[in-house]
Image: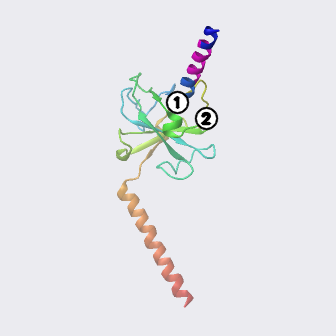
Amino acid sequence: MKKTVLLLISLGFAGFCYAGANPSIVWSNSVAIYDWTGALVSGDSAWVVRLYESADNTINFNNLLPSGDDTYTGAQFAFGISNLADGFGKGIIADSYYGNGIADADKIYSVIFNSSNVLTATRWAVIDDTVATVSYVSFTFNYNPGGTVAGDWQVVPEPASAMMLIFGAGVGMTIYRIRRNAMRR
């Protein structure tokens, strides 16, 4: 009887510990990452990889920085975190469900930036152009996004250029409204 009670208590404690564990994502690309010049990205690169979530199962390439249907999940890590061979990286994103809001069945994809800080990056690329469906089995999702080629990279607009575009749009809208109001009179 005592053994049965101890066994039940042990199983209950083990279940409690397991239930308290947070799921994680093991990110590891099996296809090499190449930059916009066609050169292999160094395995010890500090370039940043971010995970984005797709609302409609497709990638919106115009909406990455960071608004709209495709949103940044909060999961970010250095590409060469494990110092694998050149062109390959591996990262473990712990506490992904609670810390980053990535739940089972979410649609995610990876974006790499050519800097250790997204704000100073001049280029970015979606890794492998595919959306993955998160599936936590034993609280772990093994995610293999693939790789990039030179043509995948896009230029990040300079802040000054973006501000000029916004300013130009504002001036254009103001002129349009002035003309429209003048025509009504």
- Residue type indicated by callout 1: Asn
Which residue does the numbered mark 2 point to in the structure image? 104
Task: Write the residue at 37% across / 44% down.
Answer: 121
Say how the picture is coloured.
Answer: rainbow
The answer to whether residue 6 is left or right of residue 115 is right
Instruction: Mark 1 and mark 2 in contact? Answer it, CB < 8 Å.
Output: no
> Percent position (x, y) of residue 31?
51, 27
Which residue does the numbered mark 1 point to in the structure image? 22
Task: Write the residue at 48% across / 82% down.
Answer: 178
Specify start and end residues of the magenta stretch as a single range. 6-15
> Percent position (x, y) of residue 47?
38, 35
**Residue 143 higher or lower than 185, as above or below:** above
> Percent position (x, y) of residue 9?
59, 17
Give how far apart the Cα atoms at labels 1 and 2 are: 12 Å
Instruction: Point out the residue furthest to the front here.
Output: 1
Task: Write the residue at 60% across / 33% down.
Answer: 134
Name the mark on residue 92: none
Q: Quadrant of the N terminus?
A: top right
Secondary structure category for the residue under label 2: loop
Magenta stretch: helix, strand or loop mostly: helix
- Given this view, does label 1 or label 2 mark the residue nearer the observer? 1
